[in-house]
Image (tube, helix red, strand yellow):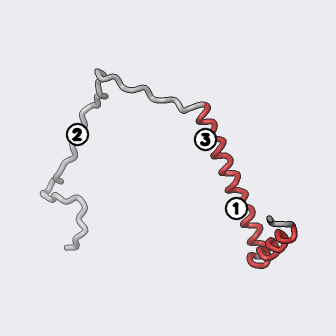
Amino acid sequence: MGIGMRELVVILLVVLVVFGAKKLRTIGSDLGAAVRGFKKSMNEGEDEELNPPRQIPPVAKDAKDAEFAETRKPRDTIPGGDTSQNSDRSV
């Protein structure tokens, strides 16, 4: 039991009638691109197994944090007494 040549031809003809030649060509190219992408991903996974990515060494416990120059704090008020910078209210 299995799919013979006759059954395969009938299935392909039904698919051709249902989808049309142009749509079938598009589906075939999309399916081919998906298979190529899958194979590429599988090869990249195998490469990672053979050559694992470089690990970042842990930081020593006695290491100091980075020091930055002091920055000015933004001013909360604008000269003239108005505390809101973006006022959407119409007067």
Between 40 and 68, the one lying in front of the other is 40
1 or 2: tag closer to the N-terminus: 1
Q: Residues within 10 Å of mark 2 (few under 14, many from 20)?
A: few
- Which residue is the extreme one toward the left? 81
3 or 2: tag closer to the N-terminus: 3
Question: Label 1 belongs to which residue?
Answer: 30
Mark seen at residue 45: 3
The vertical placement of 77 against 30, above or below, is above
- Which residue is the extreme one toward the top? 62
In the picture, measured across the screen, residue 53 lies left or right of residue 1, that is left
- Which residue is the extreme one toward the bottom? 17
Residue 29: x and y in percent read: 74, 61
Residue 73: x and y in percent read: 21, 43
**Separation of marks 3 and 1 at Cα, in angstroms:** 23 Å
Question: Label 2 belongs to which residue?
Answer: 72
Q: Residue at x 18, y 54 (%)?
A: 78
Kindly indicate the quadrant of the structure image that contains residue 70: top left
Q: Secondary structure at mark 2?
A: loop
